[in-house]
Amino acid sequence: MTTWTAPARPDTDSDSDDVTAAVERERLLLVRCVETAYESLRLMPGMDTSGRTLVWFAGHLLQAHRRATGTAESAARQ
């Protein structure tokens, strides 16, 4: 009689920790981009530091950072 056993599952805790760390790094990068965009716009006379302009500028800073570091997300977008 042959018995079958399921293959061992990889340690999901380390995978979960990796994902959590990656999400935290991405969150901090986004916060830095928004902060930089806000400070830059604040210094420009007549610029609104809230709303669409802030989001647009922060988005461009995030893309520039990804291009500079060569992350996979920027390669997929190009």
Image (cartoon, rainbow, N blue to C red):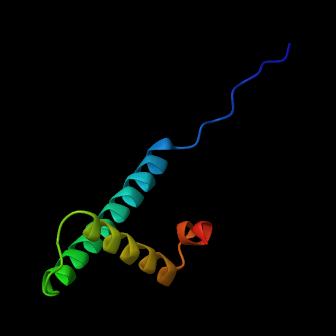
Q: Residue furthest right?
A: 1
Q: Is 66 located above or below residue 7 in the figure?
A: below
Give residue 43's position: percent from left, percent from top. Answer: 14, 86
The residue at the point 25 percent across, 70 percent down is: 54
In the image, residue 49 sits, relative to residue 13, either above or below, namely below
Is 46 on the left or on the right of 65, as rendered?
A: left
What residue is at 19 percent from the left and 75 percent from the top?
38
Which quadrant: the N terminus?
Answer: top right
* Quadrant that contains the C terminus: bottom right
| Residue projecting furthest to the front | 46
Residue 39 % position (x, y) = 17, 80
Frontmost residue, 16 versus 69? 69
Q: How many marks?
A: 0
Residue at left offset 18%, top offset 66%: 50
- Please report the residue visible at 54 percent of the width from the left and 66 percent of the height from the top: 73
Residue 66 % position (x, y): 47, 75
The front one of 8 and 30 is 30
Q: Is residue 14 left or right of residue 61?
A: right
Q: Nearer the viewer, residue 49 or 46?
A: 46
State the residue lying farthest toward the top: 1
Q: Quadrant of residue 30?
A: bottom left
Say whether residue 5 is left or right of residue 19.
Answer: right
Say above or below: 18 vs 50: above
Camera-side residue of 69 and 36: 36
62 w.r.t. 12: above or below = below
